[in-house]
Amino acid sequence: MDQAPALKLFPQTAQIASDGHLHIDGLDVIDLAREFGTPLYVYDAETISARCRAYISTEGYRCALSSHYPAPAEVTYAAKAFLCVRIAQLIASEGLGLDVVSGGELYIARQAGFPTARIHLHGNNKSASEMAQALDTGVGRIVVDSAQELAELAHIAATRDVVVPIWLRVSPDIDAHTHTYRKTGLLDSKFGLPLATGDAARAVQAALSSPYLTLRGLHAHIGSQILELEPFCRTVEALLDLAEEMGRHGFSLHEFSPGGGLGVPYVDADPGIEIETYVRSVSHAVVHGCQTRGLPLPRLVLEPGRSIIGPAGVALYTVGVRKEIPGVRTYVSVDGGMADNPRPALYGAQYTALVANKADQRPIETVAIAGKFCESGDILIHRVCLPYLEPGDILAIPVSGAYHLAMSSNYNHAHRPAAVLVRDGQARIILHRETDEDLARRNVALS
Ligand SMILES: Cc1ncc(COP(=O)(O)O)c(C=O)c1O
């Protein structure tokens, strides 16, 4: 079985079998849907590993960036894209670090036995308890987001009489040309210390003068689903300018992270940027920028989330009701929707689909794929041309690995879906489907 062009967006082990069924890692997804129910999220371990390895070598915590970056480098997976214990273990085994943004993500990472020294804590409003937890568990770096947090962290460190290695998150005022809600590096942003106002420079000086903080580096993250290289390179330049300026105050840039944000194609028309192209471009920007400023090369840290896990995941839904409005539109409803994938409603994100039990059939009708939740905006795909859809068909939506389950909700008291990891021809559950008991657990009846 060769991978058909229609499978370009699917995990790399996806194939169409002679009976017209979609297979992932040799497993018929119709069997998976039957065994585990739908909606079901199927993650392909081979795709995750291959995408990790595109960033980093397999030989331990050592970087394959070395072909483009002639100094130490590392990759930390952004857990917010999708985290569960098994995925954290897979990421750890591939030699990556982990970027967490909450006590909850840190907790799951620790349940997975993730080496805490390879964990970095981010977030624009970390609680005192999250910072204390990070200190007490030996998290590798805390990425300080504001002057207020800098003072608070120094205080927490002082009460423990420890010195905390930190980075500062800088807001460089760079437009990442992505959806407004996914831009995080503009001046008008809740994230980071603005360069333009002098807050970033003042925070560098404050950090340098604290006996309880060691300022190891600078960080910026300008947004997500970015499909151009130039904004990343401008970010590098902006932060190196700050590093050069702060050098006069005794600052040395030992570590440097231009964040994550590399986008992936969701539909055929989307441009794609290879991981290697992105790594090369960012590496060159850092090398060139440091050379022109006479700065030694810092340890380079990349923080991809979506580009590792997004293309590894497929969402499976069962087709239910058809509603044909002649001359207007045909709605085909599935058994999931905005509660497991809020991205179309939130960002107008576009997707395509394959009918997993009719993957060899020609598309004959254009339909809208509707979710089952009580919002008119709960449309997963506005227009997609597919074979005739009937109740019971299994619809497979590719590139569902990132920011779906991670952002899922219990809207309408939905049960959050199960997830399975397929590897070596076997499917193992990595997240159980929620049950009515799970939904009831938090309720308290009035007596
Ligand atoms: C600080 C930080 N790093 C990395 C990422 C990962 O971004 P992406 O999944 O687009 O690679 C994010 C996501 O928003 C982030 O906030």
Image (tube, grey):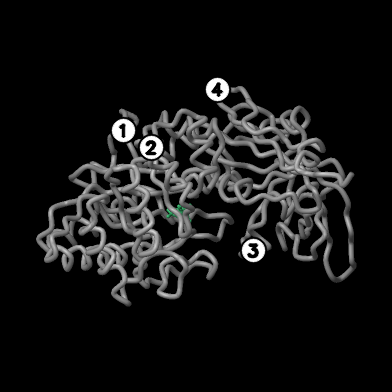
Name the residue: 42% across, 72% down.
186
Amino acid identity at mark 2? Leu
Give above or below for 75 relative to 171: above
Check residue 61 in the rendering and tell me which mark sits there, or answer none.
1
Is residue 133 shown left or right of residue 439? Answer: left
Label 2 element class: loop
Measured as percent of width and height from the top left, residue 424 is found at 55, 22
Label 1 vs 4, first from the N-terminus: 1
**Quadrant of the image where one finds ligand 1:** bottom left
Label 1 element class: loop
Q: Which residue is identified by label 4? A: 424
Name the residue: 78% across, 59% down.
367
Amino acid identity at mark 1? Tyr
Q: Residue furthest front?
A: 159
Proximity of marks 1 and 2: CB atoms separated by less than 8 Å: no
366 and 432: which is toward the camera? 432
Label 3 vs 1, first from the N-terminus: 1
Q: Residues within 10 Å of mark 4 (few under 14, many from 20)?
A: few
Q: CA distance from mark 4 to mark 3?
A: 35 Å
Q: CA distance from mark 1 to mark 2?
A: 7 Å
Q: Residues within 10 Å of mark 3 (few under 14, many from 20)?
A: few
Proximity of marks 1 and 4: CB atoms separated by less than 8 Å: no
Proximity of marks 3 and 2: CB atoms separated by less than 8 Å: no
Q: Residue furthest bottom?
A: 197
Label 4 vs 3, first from the N-terminus: 3
Measured as percent of width and height from the top left, residue 253 is found at 20, 55
Q: Which residue is identified by label 2? A: 96
Label 4 element class: loop
Amino acid identity at mark 3? Leu
Label 4 vs 2, first from the N-terminus: 2
Name the residue: 58% across, 43% down.
10
